[in-house]
Image: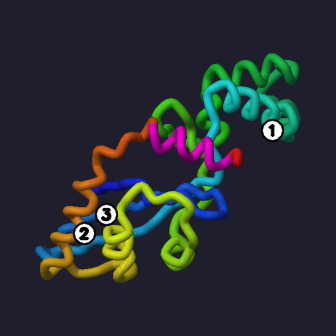
Amino acid sequence: MNKKFYIGITDDNLLIEAKVSLNDLNKQHYYYKNTASYRGIIDESEGEDRAKEYLEDDDLWREAVQSDSTTLGLTDWVDEVLSVDGWQHILDVYELGNYYLEWDCIGGWDDCKKANYKHLFISKEDFDNFFTEDGEIKIKTERAKIILELFDKYNKQDHDKIAETFRKEATE
């Protein structure tokens, strides 16, 4: 079982997401917590433009022509790739409300823990609870219950509001 919620926006304009994976391995319950960060947020129109620019400026078309994978000209090839793959797959973005997040990295646990946050989407107490320990931990006690309750508590975050806040913070 996997769960996630958004922690906040750092002073460096990264949106930080918390994730937990629960495993039942030989009746030993484990969970692994990690974080992911996103460096930008775009709407559909911006995404389509960026994907088109990327494909037009990249060597992919030349490689496709040289390998006889296409006989199309650059413009027709770009249009075909976008219609088949979709711009979201070209840019590797993740949907959040009416926007799309540009992925930065997974992990960076200590960096996320120590970062300065200009906006938190969770309470300071929950932030401290989440970052109490690192990595893979055997679930034995109330600690597991606290972590799972934390993910359940923030399971219904308003993604549109988070996206709007992130977009606003990123442009300031």
Name the secondary structure under disc 2.
Answer: helix
Dominant secondary structure (helix, strand or loop) of the stretch shown in magenta? helix
Which segment did they paint magenta?
161-170
Residue 70, by quadrant, is top right
Task: Please identify the quarter of the rendering in which residue 32 is found.
Answer: bottom left
Which residue carries the number 3 mark? 21
Q: Earlier in the sequence, mark 2 or mark 1?
A: 1
Amino acid of disc 1: Leu
Q: Are marks 3 and 1 in contact (CB under 8 Å)?
A: no
Label 3 crowd (10 A; few <14 / some 14-19 / many >=20): some
- Horizontal relation, residue 142 to residue 147: left or right: left
Q: Nearer the viewer, mark 2 or mark 1?
A: 2
Q: Quadrant of residue 118?
A: bottom right
The nearer-to-camera label among 3 and 1 is: 3
**Number of the label disc, if any, that sits on residue 60:** 1
Real-space Cα separation, disc 2 to disc 3, in angstroms: 11 Å
Frontmost residue, 72 versus 8: 8
Element carrying mark 3: strand
Name which residue type carries label 2: Ile
User: Which of the marked residues, 3 or 1, is nearer the chain's N terminus?
Assistant: 3
Residue 110, x across and y down, in percent: 52, 79
- Residue at 23% x, 81% y: name it: 138
CA distance for labels 3 and 1: 36 Å
For this rendering, which residue is in front, 50 or 61? 50
Question: Which residue carries the number 2 mark?
Answer: 147
